[in-house]
Amino acid sequence: MVPDRWVLESNAGDTGGAYRWLLEFVYGAADAPAHAAAEAAIAETSSGERQIFCHLGPVVFSLADMSPFKPAGMLFRFPLLHVDRPARGEVLHAYLESIAFAIRGNCEQIAAVAGCPVPALALSGGMTQSPTLVRLVADTLGVPVSVAEVPESASLGCAILAAVGGGVYASVAEAVAAMSRARRVDPEAGRAAACDERYRKWRSVYDLLQTWTL
């Protein structure tokens, strides 16, 4: 416990599991080459608005309904599949975008409870190794994002506490300053309006899906 430090949690759930499945489905593996291939495929797609909305796992946290049997999938604009089939990069982008949207929804809940906006965000974990995801989070939330250089944040946190307990550092704050590093990613200028519109569409479908069960 850290004195005078409190936590408000709103959890987007397991974002990596569905992406692992998606990579295995598309590339037959979810190893480093598959992740690199996915980033390359996303980079090759058009910069125009993508008409794909993904709902494959990331959630806006709610204890009111913890049912695991919610419908999921991807939505394509008809007759998109008959006229202009989306590339694999667009499908992968849509999933990463859904993570950013879920994070935004959770941050909105935290801001409502705290009574103040979320001024910045810190990201860690395996999914932060996707440059596309980090960029999407920054642009979707419109705030600076601090990305941990060591993605295994839970393990690093244990090491920090062990270092304090072992007397290597006098305080948690001192250990954090010495043992953690992060890089900053700022939101791209001019992206706010497009991200807001996409988020509103995604959220309207997400809220509708919460009323269904399978």
Image (tube, helix red, strand yellow):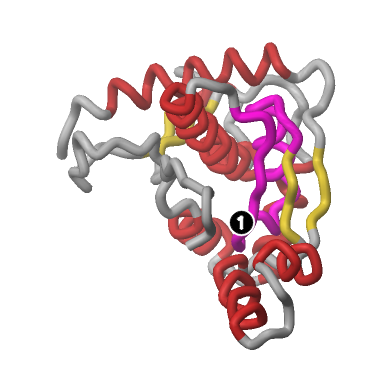
The residue sitting at 66% across, 47% down in the picture is 122
* Residue 124, above or below 32: above
Name of the residue lying farthest toward the left: 214
Task: Measuring from the top left, give residue 125's x and y in whole percent.
Answer: 60, 60
Q: How many marks?
A: 1
Horizontal and vertical percent position of residue 29: 56, 69
| Residue 178, quarter of the rendered image | bottom right
Residue 172: percent from left, percent from top: 65, 67
Residue 136 visible to the viewer: yes
Q: Quadrant of residue 135?
A: top right
Label 1, on which residue? 127
Q: Is residue 140 above or below residue 177?
A: above
- Magenta includes 47? no
- Residue at image point 81% right, 16% down: 190
Q: In this image, 84 relative to 176: left or right?
A: left
- In the drawing, does residue 27 fall left or right of residue 128? left
Residue segment shown in magenta:
118-144
Q: Is residue 198 left or right of residue 181?
A: left
Type of residue at label 1?
Met
Q: Secondary structure at mark 1?
A: helix
Which quadrant is the C terminus positioned in? top left
Residue at 39%, 45% (x, y): give it: 57
Up-down relation of residue 69 to residue 179 (above or below): above
- Name the residue nearer the viewer: 115 or 15: 115
Residue 140 among magenta residues = yes
Query: Most extreme residue toward the bottom, as rendered?
Result: 166
- From the top left corner, tell me how far across and down residue 112 is, in percent: 45, 22
Residue 76 visible, this orientation: no
Q: Is residue 67 left or right of residue 169?
A: left
| Mark 1 Cα shell of 10 Å, populated few (<14), some (14-19), many (≥20) | some
